[in-house]
Image (tube, helix red, strand yellow):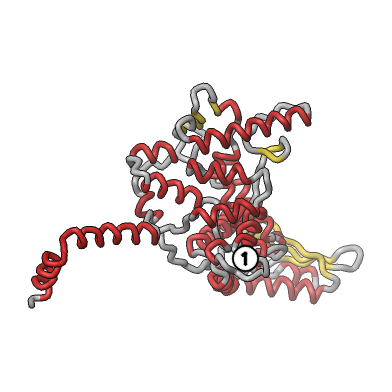
Amino acid sequence: MSREDRERRDFGTIRALPDGRFKARWRLDGREYAKTCRTEAEAEKWLTRTETELDHGVFMSPAAKRVTFEDLVQMVRDDYAANQRRSAERLECSAKRLAQTFAGQRALAITADRLTAYVGDRLAAGAAPATIRNELNALRRGFQLAKRAGKVTAVPAFPTLDADRVRTGFFEDPDLAAVRRELPADLQPVLEFGWLTGWRKGEILALTWRQVDFPAGVVRLEPGTTKNAEGREFPFSVLPPLRELLERQAERTRAAERRTGQIIPQVFHRAGKPIKDFFAAWASACDRAARDTKGAIVRPALIYRLFHDLRRTAVRNLERAGVPRAVAMKLTGHKTENVYPRYAIVASQDLRDGLSKLAGLHAARGPAGGQAARSDLIGS
C-alpha cells in the first residue's frame, strides 16, 4: 500500500515505522487511539475491525477492556467517601458477596446473563431478595461511575428483582444466647448492646467513652453522627442489664489501658484497637450456632441472621413492653412509625398470645352464651 493510499483511507491512518512495523491510528471524540502492528495487513485488519465495532455500537477502548471488578468496587468506595455516605458498611458486605463470584474478572465479562445467573445462585443459597438487590445496586453504581469517567462504554442490563419491603428476622432468647456463645469475647458486648438498645452497628462501633455519662446514667449520640443526623439519648440507669454491660466494658477497658499504657477512647474494641468490621466473625458464629455438635443444621433461621435483626428485635421488645411508639422511636433513632409495618412487628408467639386472649374471652362468656352466639352466626 503506497503512502498516498494510506492517507486516503476513509477511517484511520497507517504509518510505516523505521523498524519495519506499522502504526495504525484513528480518532474519536477528540481522542486518538493507536496500535503498533508487525505487518501492514495486521494494521489494516485492526482498523477494519474497529470501524465495524463502531458501526455496530459495540466498540470498547483498550482501557475499558482492562477495567476489573475490583476497579468498579473501588470507584463506588471513593464515591461513598466523597459524598460522606453512611451506608459504607452495607457496601462492604455487598462487595464481599459479589467478589465470591466476580473477583478478578474484567468488567466486560460481567454480562446480563451472568448477572441473572448470580441472582439465581443467591436465591438458591437462601439470600433475601432485598439483600441481593443491594448487591446488584452496588455493582450497577460501579458501572455507572465507570461509564461517567469514560472507563467503560456501556452498563450491562441488570435483572430486576422485586424485594418485599416487609423485613423479617428476630432473635428469640435461645437463638440470641447460641450466637453469643460462638462470638469472640470482644464482640459479645457489641451483640448485647445492640439487642438492648436497637442501635445500628455503625453507631455502636463508633461509640466513645465521652458519650457515656455514668453520673447521669445516659449514653448519647451527637447530632450529625447518626443516619438521620439527629442526636439521641438512651438512659441506661433505669435498665440494669445495660448499666451492668457498660460497667463491665469500662472495667475491661481500664484493664486494657493498664496493660498497653495507652488511652482507649472506644467503648467497644479489640485489645484496645477499634473494631471496624466483623462480617466474617458474625457469619461464622451464626453458622456454628445453627448446627449441633455433629454439624447438622438444627436452627436454620440462624444461617442468614443479620446483626440488623437485633435492631428489629429491640423495636419489637419495646412494643411488647407497652412503650409508646413516640418514645421507642426516640430511643432507637427511627423517624417515623413506618418501621412497624416494614419490620412486621409480629412474631408467632405474639399471635399465640393474642389467640389465648381470644380464648379467654370465649371462656368468660360461658357455654350457654357461646352456644347461642354460634347458633346465631350459622343461622341454626
- Residue 187 at x, y = what percent? 64, 45
SS at badge 1? loop
Left or right: 352 with respect to 44? left
Could you tell me if residue 210 is visible in this image?
yes
Residue closest to the eye, 199 or 46: 199
Query: In the displayed structure, does residue 124 sit left or right of residue 330?
Result: right
Q: Residue at x 51, y 51 (%)?
A: 308
Residue at horizontal 63 percent and vertical 66 percent from the top:
292
The relative height of residue 366 versus residue 226 in the rendered view (above or below) is below
The reply to whether residue 30 is visible in this rendering is no
List x then y, in percent, for residue 7.
Answer: 73, 66
Q: Position of residue 300 (x, y in %)?
A: 55, 67
Would you say 265 lies left or right of 298 here?
Answer: right
Q: Quadrant of the N terminus?
A: bottom right
Kindly identify which residue carries mark 1: 291
Q: Which residue is drawn at the image coordinates 57% and 37% (left, top)?
A: 245
In this rendering, is residue 313 above or below 332? below
On-image quarter of the C terminus: bottom left
Q: Position of residue 65 (x, y in %)?
A: 69, 64
Q: Is residue 99 above or below residue 203?
A: below
Q: Quadrant of residue 98?
A: bottom right
Q: Write down the quadrant of residue 54 in the picture.
A: bottom right
Could you tell me the amino acid type at mark 1? Arg
**Residue 195 in the figure: left or right of residue 295:** left
Is 48 drawn above or below residue 134 in the view shown? below
The picture quadrant where one finds residue 345 is bottom left
Residue sitting farthest toward the top: 215
